[in-house]
Amino acid sequence: MRNVVWLVLLFAVAVVAALTLGDNAGMASFYWEGWRLDLSLNFFIVAALATGFAVVTAVQAVNALIGLPERAREWRLLRLERAAQAALREALAEYFSGRYSRAHKAAQRALTIRDDAPAPDQDHEFRTLALLLAAGSLHRLQDRGRRDELLRRALRPARGAASSAVDDGARLLAAEWALDDRDGPRAEGLLAELQPGVARRTQALRLKLQAARLDRRPIDALHTARLLANHQAFSSTAAQGLLRSLATEALDSAHDADQLRRAWQQFDAADHRDPFVAARAARRAAQLAVPDEGRAWLRPLWDRLETLGADGRAEVALALVDVAAGLGSDWLPRIEAAQRAYPTEAAVQAAVGAVLVEQQLWGMARRPLEMAASDRQLVARARRQAWRALSRLASEEGDDARALEGLRQAAALD
């Protein structure tokens, strides 16, 4: 198609030239110190065009000759660039295929080729990526000494270069490798160097969570895990399990009532509303001889048992059994309402019986305690407490045989 267009244009030029120059009788005269040169106008036009073409061609030839060294330099640079890019691609392919020794050699070759360029510092990103590939290969090969040396070179800021995405990636990778080495403080130091926007990314939060768990700081880990859950970094089930696990770890790490109280205050409102977390906190309060605080943490949940589900009600009820010591009469209306609302749930009936025994309402306590003690689906700890309460009730009534039977049943559950 292009040839056809040029042919049409050539014919058009020929037609225009024939119509314009065919009967042109004009003359061009040149005078110089008594000399006169007459030329036909057609010859003058053709000669002028030819002269212009010759001059332009000569100028282009001279420029090409003068620029030959620069073109040769650009060609050499292009050849080096292609060789360096090919080596970097080879290193990436070998790294992903698990050939870490070959990946390290290819990355080093890419760096060597780039160092041979006249201006090796101009491509900061290329050098950093090659260094990270080489360091990552050495990390896989457990060569920590040479890996750290390459990391120092990768993290070294370039002259006059602003922080870029590759620098943030280098710090994230270095923090991940530090966690693989079980070096939590170094990982946190690298994460602290990130810009605020980068530090809120999902990968940075994941690494921060791992560092907090490695350093046994469950409260910090809990807050970070909640941020990740809000960013939908986990499924809902996994997030709930992780948050409960971290909250439990924080509660179990409290060695006195003050530490337990501080841990509970640092929890989010969502943790306070979680029946499993609140039940664990109440049990820990009972172990640290502050059952009244455990009951205070359970009370908001007990007032809305209908929203907790069967498993949540069972956890709250069994925790109330553990913190029933010293319980006041203000709990009786709540207990009676729960007894009427959930007559078939053994955990709730165990809590009802424990509270009634604490209030020494022996007659009212018998039926819920018998139901809890006979339910084989109930946890052994709650059944044991129910049998012991029944044994105590029988002793109060003077029935030694039933008291012994209750103790025997309780001992059988140990």
Image (cartoon, rainbow, N blue to C red):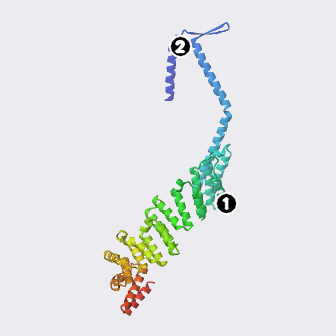
Residue at x 65%, y 38% (from the top left corner)? 74
**Residue 258 seen in this snapshot:** yes
> Which of pointers 2 and 1 lies earlier in the amino acid sequence?
2
Tell me, for residue 145, which label it has, or none. Answer: 1
Disc 2/disc 1 C-alpha distance (Å): 85 Å
Crowd around label 2: few <14 · some 14–19 · many ≥20 (10 Å) = some
Residue farthest along the top direction in this orientation = 34
Label 2 sits on a secondary structure element that is helix
Crowd around label 1: few <14 · some 14–19 · many ≥20 (10 Å) = few
Circles 2 and 1, Cβ within 8 Å, touching? The answer is no
The total number of labels drawn is 2
Residue at x 41%, y 68% (from the top left corner)? 273
Q: Name above or below for residue 302 compared with residue 386.
A: above
Label 1 sits on a secondary structure element that is helix
Tell me, for residue 21, which label it has, or none. Answer: 2
Q: Amino acid at mark 2?
A: Leu
Q: Amino acid at mark 1?
A: Gly
